[in-house]
Amino acid sequence: MQRQHSERIHNEALKHIVGGVNSPSRAYKAVGGGAPTVMERGQGGYFWDVDGNQYIDYLAAYGPIITGHAHPHITEAIKKAAETGVLYGTPTAHEVTFAKMLKEAMPGLDKVRFVNSGTEAVMTTIRVARAYTGRDKIIKFAGCYHGHSDLVLVAAGSGPATLGTPDSAGVPKSIAKEVITVPFNDIEPFREALDKWGSEIAAVLVEPIVGNFGIVEPKPGFLQEINELTHAAGALVIYDEVITGFRFMYGGAQDLLGIQPDLTAMGKIIGGGLPIGAYGGKAEIMEKVAPLGPAYQAGTMAGNPASILAGIACLEVLKQDGIYEYLDRLGSMLEEGILASAQKYSVPITINRLKGALTVYFTTEKVVNYEQAENTDGEMFARFFKLMLEQGINLAPSKYEAWFVTIAHSKEDIEATLHAVDNAFYALMNE
Ligand code: PMP
């Protein structure tokens, strides 16, 4: 496969853009380095790079592109926005339409606010929870990613019931002390943390179905216990549905699982590929936000007509009958085919899948928490990633990410992908 143009552009990018990328996960650092593939065009389930190579795309831009690239209905909406002005700085009727759509889809939302990214959405839910409870600390779960605001770039200390330390340079130690990180899917350390700091906890922040150390579902009862214990401590539960919102069904993971948080953060899919975030929850809590209440949050770009119209169009597509069943069918085909090839060549893998989202871990252990995901074979994943890329299959360059099937993928695409997986597994075990 020719990659000269990707390499040339990346070398040029390195001179002008930090690390040559605008988000670190785009670099191929975790898969042995090299120039990331520079894409030129996306259409449906496919990408074409600057060297003219075609790929089947399972990155889906880290999740938002569930309809496939340049979906005609969304493209139409974006064109309309471009023709009528993309940014007003005034209210629009579209925002109201979209807020109503989100509320209909997720019953836990009495009131919402639109922001510009998942990071902003999560960051603000924490501020609102603090304003509502008058407390400062939060509990989060190891390996869940919640954007790059200070509070959520904090790692666990040496044991489960210790205060956090900054996970990034530039995050003050004083802020890290407000964050407690405990393992996902294990209620005891969580209970311990609440026993110790319960009266200081403003909120517990969780991805209800994890997307950031692969797709990991909560054990039965885990989220229910979190709700009960958190509420008993007088704190709020925040669900980060930035990945899970509209991913597995029309609505949130909260509807799929039948359990509601107090506040929800959203992003990704709800912008139809344009920048967006949203947060919402019970009226009584949301009314703490300015201009009604004392918690400040604002945004020049917030609720811009382009993102809102693209978001409405995307949800209109997803609302059609059979969408999630289709994603499930293709996801299941992928899972079965990958497992069959793994068995054929004795490749040690485990797959976690929910509907059209799946993670292939290079381990034979079951993965239910971050530590287990960390212990999977990163070197083998890196070789697999490159072998797939060479055959025109674009995956996320990290062992922690999911493959996202889109509604633009066909059965033939899945078959072609499985053929590539079979070749890659053979090469992994024989070369
Ligand atoms: N929360 C979750 C669960 C995410 O996966 C991400 C992004 N990967 C974010 C928050 C941050 O969203 P954004 O990149 O739009 O700021």
Image: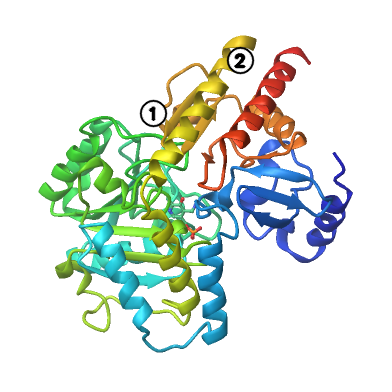
The quarter of the displayed image where residue 425 is located: top right
Kindly tell me whether residue 174 is visible in this rendering: no
Tell me the crowding category of disc 2: few under 14, some 14 to 19, or many 20 or more residues within 10 angstroms, Cα based: some
Classify mark 2 as within 8 Å of ligand 1 or not, answering yes or no.
no
Q: Quadrant of the N terminus?
A: top right
Q: Alpha carbon of mark 2 to alpha carbon of mark 1: how far? A: 20 Å
Q: Residue at x 57, y 49 (%)?
A: 60
Q: Which residue is mark 1?
A: 368
Q: Residue at x 71, y 43 (%)?
A: 55
Q: 75 left or right of 2?
A: left
Give yes or no for contact between labels 2 and 1 (Cβ–Cβ under 8 Å): no
Q: 270 left or right of 200?
A: right
Tell me the crowding category of disc 1: few under 14, some 14 to 19, or many 20 or more residues within 10 angstroms, Cα based: many
Tag on residue 347? 2
Is 182 placed above or below 134 here? above
The quarter of the displayed image where residue 196 is located: top left
Q: 107 left or right of 48?
A: left
Q: Amino acid at mark 2?
A: Val
**Could you tell me how many numbered marks the image carries?**
2
Residue 75 in picture, x, y percent from top left:
56, 67
Q: Nearer the viewer, residue 268 or 201?
A: 268
Which SS class for mark 2? loop
Q: Amino acid at mark 1?
A: Val
Residue 321 in picture, x, y percent from top left:
36, 49
